[in-house]
Image (tube, helix red, strand yellow):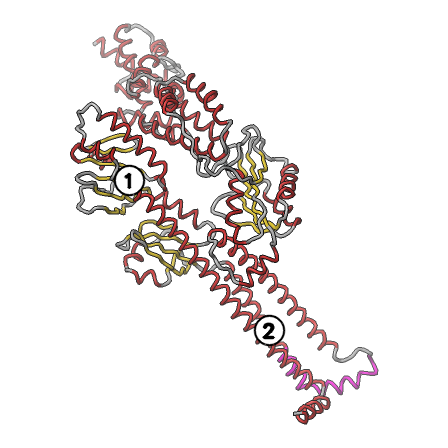
Amino acid sequence: MRTIFRSVTARYHRSSVLSKLLVFNMIFIILLTGLLVFNYSYLKTNVKEQVVRTNEGFLKQMSGDLTEQWLDVRNMIYNFSVSLDTKFLSNNPNKSRTYYSALLAYKNKITESNMRLPFRAQLSTYFPNQDLVISSDGTRNLDVFYKNLDLKNGEEVCRCLLQEELERVYNFGSMIVFSYRLFPEGYIFVQIAKSELLAYLNNQTSLLDNVVVISDGNNSLVVSSASLDQAVFGQGSEALSRRVVIDGNSYTPISQTDALFTYTVLFSESQMQEKLKQANAYTILLFALFLAVNLGFLFVNWSMFRPLRLMANTFNSWTTAPATNNEFAILSDTFKELNSVTVSMKQEITEQADILEHNALLRLSTDETYAMKPDMSRMLSAKYPSYAVITVIEEDERGRSVRKYAPLLAEALRQAGAFIRLHAHSDNLIYFINCSDATALAELVSGVFEDGPSDTVSDGLTLCGISSVHTRLEDIGQALQESSDAIDKHVPDLGELKRIVLYQARDSGQAAVIHLSIDKEQELVNYTLKGNADALGQFFDKTIRKTFKSLTFEQLRNMLRYFHDLLLVILNSKKIGIEEVWEAPPDLSRTYHLPYLFRQIQEGYLFVAKRSALPNTPLQEQIKQYLDKHYANPDLSLTVIADHFSITHVYLSTYFKKHTGYNLNYYMHLIRIQAAIQLIQTHPNLAMKDVAERVGYSNAGTFIRHFKKISGTTPTQHVRLLQE
C-alpha cells in the first residue's frame, strides 16, 4: 500500500501543471455533484413529510371540531326530545288555560338554545296534532313553514318532516336540515345555513392554502371553500383518492369520515416547496454552466498547451504579466458565481427553517401531545429558553381591523431578540417572543404605542394582552390562551381604548355570559315595541351603562351579543329588514370596539321604537294619506316623503310599487291631476297658471305635460269639452 502511494505521489509531482489542474477539477466536480444530490434529496423529502404531516394534523383537528359541534347539535335535539316541556306542550290541548303560557315559555327556551348552537343554527319543533311549528321567531302552521323554507333555499322544494326515519340529514342548496322524530308524534329539526358553515371553513383555511370539502353519506357535495364541480364527487370514493384540478392547480386529497359527513382536505404544493424547487433548479443550472466552462477550459488548454507555452516564452521578454492571468480570471469569476449561489441557498434554507419553526409552534399550540422532531425541539428550546405570547388588537372608530402599530412593533421586537409571528385564524396580531420578564415586555410595547404614528385615529381601539412567562414549549397553547384572557378577563375603561394588560390568574368560575333579569328584558322590549324612545334612551344611559362598569371585556361582548340577538328577534317580529336599520350590521364575532358596538345596537332599538310610534295603519295607506294632504306642496319629493317615514327613498319606492302596483312618482302626479280636474270643473274661468300652482306645480309647462299624459287631453281641451 505504501509503495502504491509513493508511486502515485511521484507520478503527481512529475506531471504537468495542466494534468494537476485536470485532477483537481475532476475531484471538485465529483464532490460538488454528490453534495448537490444529497442536498436536493434531503430537503425535498424532509419538506414533503412536514407538509403532509401538517395537513393531516389540520384535517384531524378540523374534523374533530366539526364532529364535536355536530354532537352538540344532536345532544341539544335529544335534550329537547326528552324534555318535560316538550311532552307537556305536545299533549296539552291548545284551548286549555295553561297552553299559551306554556307555549311562550317553550319558545323562549328555543331562543336560549339557539344562542348556544354553533353556526347560528335555528332549532324548531313541530307537533302534527296541532299543525304547529314553534320557532324562536314565532309559531306557524306547516304549510307556511314549508313556504318560508323553500324561499330560503331558492325555491327548492324542502319537505323535511313526516318521515319514517328516527333522524335524518337533508342536504339542500342553501342549508342543511337535521330532523329528529318525537314519540309518539312530532318532530324536532335544526336549520343550518351553509353560508355560516362556509365562513367557518374560510377561517380555518386562512393560514394554509387548502381547500376544505364536506360531503354527506351519499357522497354529495355539502359545502366547499372553493368552487368545485359536483361531478367530481359523483364518481364515488375513487375520485377522492387521486389528485383534483381546481383553476389549473393540482391538489392532493386526504379524507376523514364520521357518522354523518366526510371531510376532505385538498392541499397543493406550498410556497416553501416552490422556493425549494426554484433554488435547486438554479443550483443545477449553475452547476451545468460551471461544468461546461471547466470542460471547455480544460479542452482549450489541452489542445493549445504547447503553442501557448512557446508564445509565452517568446513574449516573456516583452511583458512581465504571466500568461496564465486569463485562466485565473476565469477561475475567480467561477468561484464568485459559486459563492453567490451558496449565499442564495443559505437564505432559502433560513426561510425554510423559519417556516418549519412556525408550523411546529402552531401545531404544538393546538395539540399538546404533538411530538416534534428532536432536532427541532432542541433548536427551539435553545433559541427560546423562556418565552411569552402577546395578542395585539387594532381597530378604527368603526370596529374595522387596521395595522397602524404593527410595523413599529415588529421592528421593536426584532431589535429586542428572537420572535415569531403566529398566523392565527383571525385578524389579531399574535407574537411568540423570547422573554424572561413580562413587565419589561409590557414597557417595550408601551413605548411603541406612545411613539405611534401621527395619523392614528383618536377613537380607534388598541389592546395588547401579554401572557405570563413560560419555559416549556408544550405550554404554548396555555400561553396563547393567557394572552387572550388578559384582554377578555379584565374590566375595561370605555373612556381609554388604548391599553396593555398583563395576564393575571382570575376566578375561573366567573360567568362569561351575563343576561338581564326577566323584568329588565321585558321593560326593554315594552319600551321598544311601544315606541317610547325617551324611556329607551334613559334605559340605555342609566341602567345599562351602570351595569357595564362592573363587567369584564368578555362579559361586555357577550351582553352586547345578547342585546343584538334580542333586537334581531324584535326586527323579525316587526317585519323590518336589517338593511333598513344599518348600512353595515355590526360584526360581534370579530369587533372588540365596545363603544362602537354599543352605539350601533342602541341606534337599532331607537329605530324600531321610532317605527313603532307610527300609527297601526299599513304603511302604503299612510303614504297615500300623506300625499292626499300634502300634494299641493311644490317641494314634495321622494326624499321628503322618505324622511317623514324614517326610511330610505329606495326602500320607499320599492315598497309602494310592490303593495299598490303604482310607481310613487306617477301616483303623486295622478293625485295632483285629479285635484286639478275637480278644480277646473268647479272654477272653469280660473287661469291654468293658478290651477297649476294650487295643485303643486310651480311651472305651467310641467303641469300641462303631466295633465296630457294622464288624462289624454290638455287642460284647455278639457275645459272646451266640459263647455260642449
Figure check: 48 above or below 116:
below
Instruction: Give amino acid for label 1.
Output: Asn
Which stretch did the figure color magenta?
294-319
Seen at 24% across and 35% down, the residue is 86
Q: For residue 494, what is the image quadrant?
A: top right
Compare residues 259 and 350 and report the one nearer the observer. 259
> Looking at the picture, how far across and down is residue 420, in whole percent?
57, 51
Residue 174: x percent and y percent? 30, 43
1 or 659: which is nearer to us?
1
Marking on residue 595: none
What residue would you read off at disc 2?
Answer: 289
Residue on which disc 1 sits? 79
Q: Up-down: is 107 above or below 389?
A: above
Residue sitting at x 29%, y 26%: 657
Pair 2/1: label in front: 1
Magenta: main secondary structure: helix
Q: CA distance from mark 2 to mark 1?
A: 74 Å
